[in-house]
Amino acid sequence: MSPAGSAARDSLPKPPYWDEATRALGRADPVLRRLVRAHPGVHLTRRSDAFTALARAICGQQISVQAAEAVWRRFVATVAPEAAQAAFPALRPSVVVGSDPATLRACGLSARKALYVHDLARHFAEGRLDPMQWRTLSDEALIEALCDVKGIGRWTAEMFLIFHELRPDVLPQDDIGLQRAIALHYHRGRRVAVAAIRRRGDTWRPWRSVATWYLWRSLDPIPVEY
């Protein structure tokens, strides 16, 4: 990332709980204390609206980062040409609902992903997914609501809760990156059972999202942004 891009990211507001979380984790866990010190001035940020972030997540499933970016750019150019050059465009569910599936497939989406994006857009357009109501939902209730969309499973929902909703206490125990980082820092590189990950996560409550984020940074210093 360029210095300008890094500066722009760092100027975004951090979650209100971030400093409290890093202090608590640093006191409780020597590994996280070291990781927090190794990555100063960076934190979770939110860039996109909820619908756009989820649509992008679906478009990028099970393909390489480069392929996902190319498909996403073609998709944006098709459904929101006025925003085609924006780093973080805002897409309208109603436009996607009205798009022909064949047109979406021409962007590089598989037939299944085109169906998934349509279903996501319908959920938003019909109010079955309403971000204004999400603050009243627990993490599990929101994950359940998101998983009602075709193509959104628990992992995608957990990533959305961490990166977009900025929920502080999500533990994506099945995430490969988190598993690798825990094995590296706590188990001398040995593979770790999910039950052990849950036990480790219990020591990070109520800041499991923050702990996970720093462990990810130990593998890749450039943060993901939704």
Image (cartoon, grey):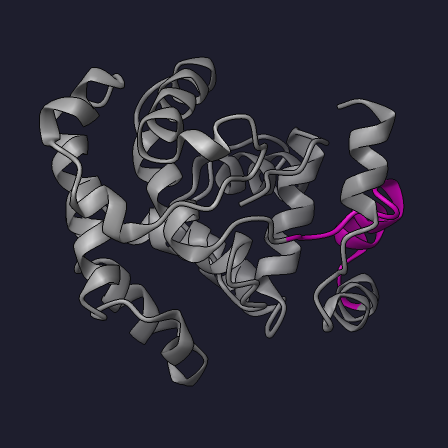
Residue at 17 percent across and 55 percent down: it is 122
Magenta part of the protein: which range? 28-45
Any part of residue 141 in sight: yes
Residue 225 occupies quadrant: top right
Quarter in which the N terminus is drawn: top right
Expressed as whole percent of the image width and height from the top left, the position of residue 72 reads 39, 26
Tell me if 80 is positioned left or right of 165 in this view: left
Farthest residue, direction bottom: 136
Any part of residue 172 in sight: no
Expressed as whole percent of the image width and height from the top left, the position of residue 137 reads 37, 80
Residue at 39 percent across and 70 percent down: it is 131
Residue at 45 percent across and 50 percent down: it is 159
Nearer to us in this view, 199 or 32: 32
Q: Does the segment drawn in magenta span residue 121?
A: no
Expressed as whole percent of the image width and height from the top left, the position of residue 25 reads 75, 64
In this rendering, the answer to whether 191 lies above or below 141 is above
Nearer to us in this view, 49 or 213: 49
Tell me if 30 is positioned left or right of 77 in this view: right
Expressed as whole percent of the image width and height from the top left, the position of residue 17 reads 72, 72
Residue at 42 percent across and 16 percent down: it is 70
In this rendering, the answer to whether 93 lies above or below 165 is above
